[in-house]
Image (cartoon, rainbow, N blue to C red):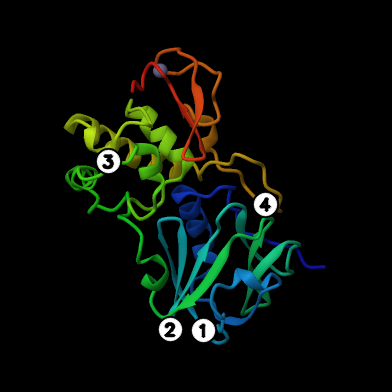
Amino acid sequence: VGRIKTAPACSHVPELPEVETCRRALAPRLAGRTLTDAVTPWPRAAATPLVVTGRCIVRLDRRGKFLLLRLDRGWLVIHLRMTGRLVVVRELPPRTTAAFQLDGDEWFCLVDVRKFGRAWQVARASEVVGHLGPEPLSRHFTAARFSAMLAPRRARLKPLLLNQRFLAGLGNIYVDESLHAARIHPLRTANTLSTGEVRRLHRYIRTILRAAITEGGTTIQNFAGPDGKPGRFRSRLQVFRRSGEACGGCGTIIERSVVAQRGTHFCPHCQRL
Ligand SMILES: [Zn+2]
């Protein structure tokens, strides 16, 4: 039996930093490889027919929470949703929902306990990711642009920042952390932020995403998988899943409430409504 090698597995509930961590780990394993087959043990994992035989992987990109594989013709787009993770292995692991065979007898697998992860093969990536809002780490996402995006919006900040059409890549963890760092309540109405608050929120969204990428993302639940390295950003979370603990800024007990069906963690002293 040959040694089973995997790329570092992705954490659960992947957001931008976790998908970027995945992209960086997988790129050296996948770029330049030729795809020889595709199988879908869970057929619904294929959002389009996957006809990849003979296609070469040119490079790996990311847009929001989507992983993009640039092929010599067209694109493979993958979204991990809740519990998907990506591994490069010699044999398909249990709970593989879709797998791409590589030259050299390895498989690039989507392993997914809850089976919500999806793969698309499209001529243009925009067919899948064209609806997304700006990329928060792009140099085009300036404080001035963020201000112009917020100005016409009467939504509460928490659901607005989770809306991928508004801004790509943020999920529950990084929205809660960014709002806490910026000292802004999650239920504030978007168009009521002062210029200073917009600049703070813009700065912390970017700072926190960059720090999380540096730490390999955040792992909330442990995941199984040989060589699966947990993300290290969890130890740096200030409010997410820390309700009942003291705020690092002021010592007030962190609260949790439910906003738009999502658990929302905040400091009632630092983040006034
Ligand atoms: Zn506080």
- Comes first in the chain, label 1 or label 3: 1
Quadrant holding the N terminus: bottom right
Res 52 quadrant in image: bottom right
Q: Where is residue 238 shown, x and y percent of the image? A: 47, 27
Quadrant for ligand 1 reads top left
Residue kind at label 2, given as amino acid type: Arg
- The reply to whether discs 4 and 1 touch (Cβ–Cβ < 8 Å) is no
Quote the CA–CA distance across marks 1 and 3.
46 Å
Quadrant holding the C terminus: top left
Most extreme residue toward the top, as rendered?
A: 251
- The reply to whether discs 1 and 2 touch (Cβ–Cβ < 8 Å) is yes
- The reply to whether discs 4 and 2 touch (Cβ–Cβ < 8 Å) is no
Q: Crowding at label 2, few (<14), some or many (≥20) Cα neighbours within 10 Å?
A: some
Most extreme residue toward the bottom, as rendered?
A: 54
Quote the CA–CA distance across marks 4 and 2.
32 Å
Point out the frontmost of discs 4 and 1.
1
Query: Which residue in the protein does label 4 denote?
Result: 227
- Comes first in the chain, label 1 or label 2: 1
Query: Which residue in the protein does label 3 denote?
Result: 154
- Comes first in the chain, label 4 or label 2: 2
Query: Which residue in the protein does label 1 denote?
Result: 55
Residue ID at (44%, 50%): 16
Which numbered dot is residue 73? 2
Residue kind at label 3, given as amino acid type: Arg
Q: Is mark 1 within 8 Å of ligand 1?
A: no
Element carrying mark 3: loop
Q: Where is residue 25 shown, x and y percent of the image? A: 53, 57
- Comes first in the chain, label 4 or label 1: 1
Point out the frontmost of discs 4 and 2.
2
Element carrying mark 1: loop
Residue ID at (34%, 37%): 156
Quote the CA–CA distance across marks 3 and 4.
45 Å
